[in-house]
Image: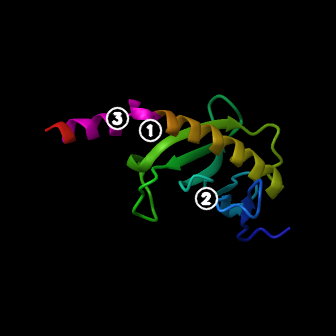
Amino acid sequence: MDHGHTEFAMTAHNNSAAPAFVIDDLSPGPNAHGFGQTGRGRTFAFQVRNSALHRRTLHVEVYRADLETTVPDSSDVEASVDRPVVDVDLGDERSIAAAVRDAVSDAETIAAQRDDGHGVRALLSRWTSAG
C-alpha cells in the first residue's frame, strides 16, 4: 500500500458535469488525515485524533464556499463533525475515504442549514445591508 499522497474521486455518474467528491490527500494510519473538496465545491479537512468520549475520533471540518486562502483558520469553518472510528480500518484508504465521505455529507447538511438564513454570517449580512 502506498502511504504517499492518494486521490479519491467519488461520483455517481462519471459523465456528470457536477463536481465530484474528491479527497486530494489521504494519509492512512492511526492518525489518518487529509483534505479534499465536496461535491458542492467546498473544501474540507479531516484527521483522526484522540477524544474524551471515544478512543479515536474522525474530525471533519467543512470550510465556507467563498474561501480565498489555501490555509483556512477557525473563522473559515462552516461546520464540523466528529465520528467514532471503531468500525473504520485506519490502515485501509477505502475504509477511511468512505467514513470521511459520510462525515462530510453530515457536515454539509449542517452548513446548508446555516446557509438557509439562520447562521451568524446571514444575520450579519442582513445587518450590514440594512445599514
> Label 3, label 1: how many angstroms apart (C-alpha)?
9 Å
* Crowd class of label 2 (few under 14; some 14 to 19; many from 20; radius 10 Å): many
> Label 2, label 3: how many angstroms apart (C-alpha)?
25 Å
- Magenta segment, which residues? 114-128
User: Could you tell me if residue 91 is visible in this image?
Assistant: no
Name the residue nearer the viewer: 25 or 116: 116
| Residues tagged 3 and 1 counted as in contact (Cβ below 8 A) | no
* Crowd class of label 1 (few under 14; some 14 to 19; many from 20; radius 10 Å): some
Which residue is denoted by mark 1 in the rendering? 115
On the image, the x and y values in percent for residue 50 come to 64, 41
On the image, the x and y values in percent for residue 17 come to 65, 62
Q: Secondary structure under badge 3?
A: helix
On the image, the x and y values in percent for residue 57 come to 67, 39
> Label 1, label 2: how many angstroms apart (C-alpha)?
22 Å
| Residues tagged 1 and 2 counted as in contact (Cβ below 8 A) | no
Which residue is denoted by mark 2 in the rendering? 35
On the image, the x and y values in percent for residue 47 come to 63, 50
Q: Nearer the viewer, mark 3 or mark 1?
A: 1
Which residue is denoted by mark 3 in the rendering? 120
